[in-house]
Amino acid sequence: MAWNFLLIWGIFTSIMVADYAREECPHPPQIDFASFETQIYMKGTILDCSCKPGYDRKEGTPLLIVCEDTQGHLSWNDKCQCKGKSPQSQEEQSVSSAPINPGEQTDRTQTITDVRLQTYNLTGHCLEPVLWSHASETKSYQFVVGQTLQYQCLKTSKYKGTAESTCIKSNGKLTWTKPHLKCSNVTSTETSAPSSCTTEYKIAAVAACIFLMSFVIFLVWITWRKRWRRRRQTAKEKTKKREVRSQQYCGKNHMPDHPVGLLSA
């Protein structure tokens, strides 16, 4: 433990002595469904020698490697190495559990590298460090001012595109320029379409039900009004007939039983 502490202290001391003006950038910006990479690293960049689960850093190898000046040009000051935690897995150290063919790695990045290397002085930058056996799936870098990262949408994303972000010093504060890139997940886009259609169908069904209910209520109201008017008219007619019959009945009751001439005789 003491040896490791002294090693780390020595690395950071050498960095500060060699480049006292080195300024560390914050964590690069994150874009949904996108990743960043670069093939060229600035002087002072630090890489954490992390291993994948089940493996530890080999004794005698550094915890960190640094891009620094070596014999007039920049390069990584050491190499990262991992070993298995159990004695049986130490035999696998010469062969990576997840090897990456250098030819495939070159083919994947050759186009981008060829274009960008033309604009840089190779003696002033470090290239991508050699992949070590049993390395962690994600690398952890500490970048410095001037570092540029290339962002690209993942293969599983809907939209394609690339963008760049550079670490700069603005108003005395280190920050990354905003990469203008937007990516969308294919899975979430596909699954969201049926849900939107379902919502539209639900809204249409509710609207149709409301319309039908309103139409039925309107028909019931019209029918009831017609019947009410008909009953009212019938009631009026019956009332008139009763009045006529009553008048006729009263007239008959007031007529005399004998003629007037007979009564006087």
Image: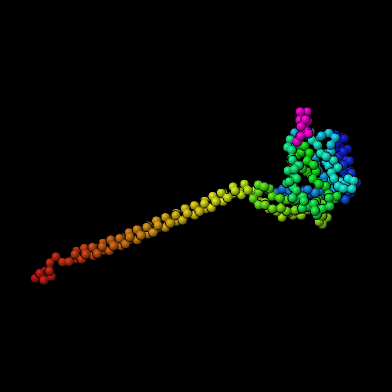
- Which residue is at 89% across, 48% downward? 72
Is residue 49 visible in this depiction of the protein? yes
Q: Is residue 216 above or below residue 262?
A: above
Q: Nearer the viewer, residue 202 or 107?
A: 107
Q: Is residue 83 left or right of residue 239?
A: right
Q: Is residue 89 magenta?
A: yes
Residue 58 appears at what percent x and percent y? 81, 34
By secondary structure, the bulk of the magenta-drawn segment is best described as helix
Q: Is residue 237 above or below residue 85?
A: below
Is residue 50 visible in this depiction of the protein? no
Residue 148 appears at what percent x and percent y? 78, 52
Instruction: Indicate the quadrant where residue 232 lies.
Output: bottom left
Q: Is residue 74 left or right of residue 188?
A: right
Residue 166 appears at what percent x and percent y? 78, 53
Residue 132 appears at what percent x and percent y? 78, 39
Count every numbered label the image shows and give the total.
0
Q: Is residue 85 magenta?
A: yes
Q: Quadrant of the C terminus?
A: bottom left
- Which residue is at 44% across, 54% downward? 213
Q: Is residue 183 left or right of residue 65?
A: left
Scheme of colours in the image:
rainbow
Q: Residue furthest left?
A: 265
- Which residue is at 67% across, 52% downward? 160
Q: Nearer the viewer, residue 29 or 257?
A: 29
Q: Is residue 31 above or below residue 250?
A: above
Q: Is residue 239 above or below residue 205?
A: below
- Which residue is at 83% across, 55% downward? 172
Instruction: Give the residues in magenta.
Output: 84-96
